[in-house]
Image: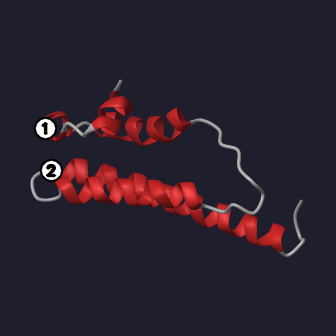
Amino acid sequence: MLPALVEAAPDVSLFELLQNSNVESGLQTAVPSRRGATTRALDEGGVREKELVEKYRRMAEQVADGSPRTTAIMRSLATSYEADARREERSAERFRRGLER
């Protein structure tokens, strides 16, 4: 349920009111898990993850002034997807160079 709330529009007051690190940590695990496995062309790289980075950065910016916990969650998700994008880019580059099939 919480990942769906975040995807639609973060209920900033929820995280600020709860101030529960277990809920926040669970959400940071649940959102990427909800996405599930992805398939892609071997040379596609991290395009999809880069889109998610921008999405969560925008969400963080929207709530930055009044919701520090929510902002931190959105930024953490963006950082996680940024690492995923770099990993996918490295894999695609190895494929392009003929080092991986």
User: In the rendered structure, which amino acid carries the disc numbered 2?
Assistant: Ser
The single residue placed furthest to the bottom in the displayed view is 97
Q: CA distance from mark 2 to mark 1?
A: 7 Å
Instruction: State whether residue 92 is above or below residue 1.
Output: below
Residue 27 is situated, as x and y percent measured from the top left of the image, at 38, 37
Q: Are marks 2 and 1 in contact (CB under 8 Å)?
A: yes
Q: Return the mark for residue 43.
A: none
Residue to which mark 2 is pinned: 67
Instruction: State whether residue 85 is above or below residue 36.
Output: below
Classify residue 78 as left or right of residue 34.
left
Residue to which mark 1 is pinned: 13
Q: Residues within 10 Å of mark 1 (few under 14, many from 20)?
A: few
Residue 9 is situated, as x and y percent measured from the top left of the image, at 25, 39
The single residue placed furthest to the left in the displayed view is 66
> Which residue occupies the foreground of this view, 63 or 15?
63
User: In the rendered structure, which amino acid carries the disc numbered 1?
Assistant: Ser
Residue 33 is situated, as x and y percent measured from the top left of the image, at 53, 36
Which quadrant: the C terminus?
bottom right
Q: Of helix, strand and loop, which one carries label 1?
A: helix
Total labels: the figure holds: 2
Residue 69 is situated, as x and y percent measured from the top left of the image, at 22, 49
Q: Residue at x 36, y 54 (%)?
A: 56
Which quadrant: the N terminus?
top left
Q: Residue at x 32, y 33 (%)?
A: 23
Classify residue 35 as left or right of residue 60.
right
Q: Residue at x 11, y 59 (%)?
A: 65
Q: Of helix, strand and loop, which one carries label 2?
A: loop
Q: Residues within 10 Å of mark 2 (few under 14, many from 20)?
A: some
